[in-house]
Image (cartoon, rainbow, N blue to C red):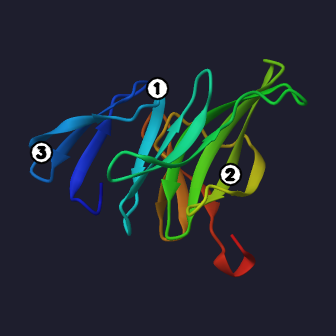
């Protein structure tokens, strides 16, 4: 976590997080109280962290330093469209939470969307659908210099999205 100068290493596809200081000394662990975590992201300017997960009930969660949930979004299957959602990568900037959501329509077509949520209350601002030109996200989404990136399984970095604050994201 950037604010506390700790490296938090989540147990992929589980709920445990191992904490290390900047000299790589083990500091303990914590439980996220949500299973099947895909990525954990600390908030640089605050006492919060964000989790994306998938499985039976995909979710994104904002938690505080005491590990208490501030807000959570559970994204189960949409009964009208028969789309099943999987939350992949998650990252944050000063104002927003960015999440790669993968969804399967009738178990046949997989698509990915970049969805943007407001940090303060978790309200979905917008989703941009139809990303087919970057790898399936199992975590790894990151923010740098008003751009979002995601690596593939060969550690190649793919540019995903340019944030244009003048255009309202």
Q: Residues within 10 Å of mark 3 (few under 14, many from 20)?
A: few
Q: Residues within 10 Å of mark 1 (few under 14, many from 20)?
A: many
Image spot of residue 160 (x, y percent):
61, 54
Residue drawn at 33 percent across, 53 percent down:
65
Q: CA distance from mark 1 to mark 3?
A: 25 Å
Image spot of residue 105 (x, y percent):
82, 26
**Hey, which quadrant is residue 86 in on the image?**
top right
Q: CA distance from mark 1 to mark 2?
A: 21 Å
Residue drawn at 81 percent across, 19 percent down:
108
- 36 or 63: nearer the viewer: 63
- 15 or 169: nearer the viewer: 15
Indicate the secondary structure of the residue bearing disc 3.
loop
Q: Is label 1 or label 2 in front? A: 1
User: In the displayed structure, does residue 92 sit left or right of residue 87?
Assistant: left
Regarding residue 79, the answer to whether it shows in the image is: yes
Label 2 with label 3: CB-CB less than 8 Å: no
Q: Which mark is residue 35?
A: 1
Q: Is residue 96 above or below residue 32?
A: below
Residue, disc 2: 115
Disc with the residue nearer the chain's start (1 vs 2):
1
Query: In the rendered view of the protein, which quadrant contains the C terminus?
Result: bottom right
Image spot of residue 78 (x, y percent):
81, 30
Residue, disc 3: 24
**Hey, which quadrant is residue 106 in on the image?**
top right
Image spot of residue 135 (x, y percent):
59, 37
Q: Is residue 49 above or below residue 111?
A: below
Disc with the residue nearer the chain's start (1 vs 3):
3
Indicate the secondary structure of the residue bearing disc 1.
loop
């Amino acid at each position: 976590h950037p604010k506390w100068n700790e490296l938090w290493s989540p147990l992929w596809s589980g709920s445990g997080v191992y904490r290390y200081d900047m000299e790589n000394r083990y500091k303990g662990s914590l439980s996220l109280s949500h299973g099947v975590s895909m990525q954990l992201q600390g908030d640089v300017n605050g006492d919060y962290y964000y989790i994306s997960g998938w499985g039976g009930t995909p979710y994104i969660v904002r938690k505080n330093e005491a590990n208490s949930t501030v807000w959570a979004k559970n994204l189960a299957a949409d009964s009208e469209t028969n789309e099943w959602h999987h939350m992949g990568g998650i990252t944050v900037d000063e104002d927003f939470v960015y999440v790669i959501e993968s969804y399967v329509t009738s178990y046949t077509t997989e698509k990915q969307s970049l969805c943007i949520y407001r940090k303060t209350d978790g309200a979905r601002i917008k989703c941009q659908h139809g990303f087919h030109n970057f790898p399936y996200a199992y975590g790894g989404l990151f923010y740098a210099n008003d751009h979002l990136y995601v690596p593939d399984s060969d550690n190649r970095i793919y540019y995903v999205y340019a944030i244009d604050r003048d255009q309202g994201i």
